[in-house]
Image: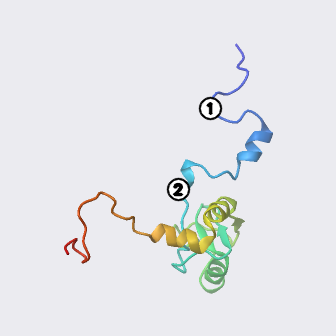
Amino acid sequence: REMMGKLDGPDSDEERERDKFKIGKNDDDLPFACHLSRGPFEDPMLTACGHYFSANWISRHFREKNTRCPICEKQTYGMLNAAPKLRAKAKAVGGFQKLFELALAVPDDDDGGGGGDDAYGGG
């Protein structure tokens, strides 16, 4: 028997291309800060081994140290790729600074646990 199409994914090259940079559930694993600068991304780039860095910081690392990935030590030969999924995620929330702030934000305690004015919930 021949299946007419998949039930759980895009059927055509056109659909796959359209969805290539779509933000989905798995994109929660994308980083919010550059490993080298420890701050919000500025012009993020992606290594072949899948690690993200700000372009200026990774370029400096390549010039001053070596062309290995600072995270996993795999040889990159200084080659970098654009990071469209990370850029799309940042754009969706209002930019890289906002992405950074949201990732560091501590959620409010909305359990109605009788909080108060001081740090321990007292009054």
Q: Secondary structure at mark 1?
A: loop
For the C terminus, the quadrant is bottom left
Tell me: 30 left or right of 62.
left
* Mark pair 2, 1: CA separation: 20 Å
Name the disc covering residue 27, or none.
none
At 57% from the left and 66% from the top, the residue drawn is 74
Q: Secondary structure at mark 2?
A: helix
**Which image quadrant is residue 81 in?**
bottom right
**Which image quadrant is residue 9 in?**
top right
Tell me: 31 left or right of 7.
left
Q: Residue furthest bottom?
A: 64
Of 55 and 65, the residue lying toward us: 55
For the N terminus, the quadrant is top right
Rate crowding at label 1 as few (under 14), some (14 to 19) or many (20 or more) other CA atoms within 10 Å. few
Of 19 and 123, the residue lying toward us: 123
Amino acid of disc 2: Asp
At 70% from the left and 69% from the top, the residue drawn is 79
Q: Is residue 15 above or below residue 27?
A: above
Amino acid of disc 1: Asp
Upstream in the sequence, badge 2 or badge 1?
A: 1
Horizontal and vertical percent position of residue 78: 69, 73
Horizontal and vertical percent position of residue 98: 57, 71
Q: Residue furthest top?
A: 1
Name the disc covering residue 28, or none.
2
Residue hosting label 1:
8
Q: Is residue 88 above or below residue 95?
A: above
Horizontal and vertical percent position of residue 95: 63, 70
Rate crowding at label 2 as few (under 14), some (14 to 19) or many (20 or more) other CA atoms within 10 Å. few
Q: Residue furthest left?
A: 122
Horizontal and vertical percent position of residue 66: 61, 79
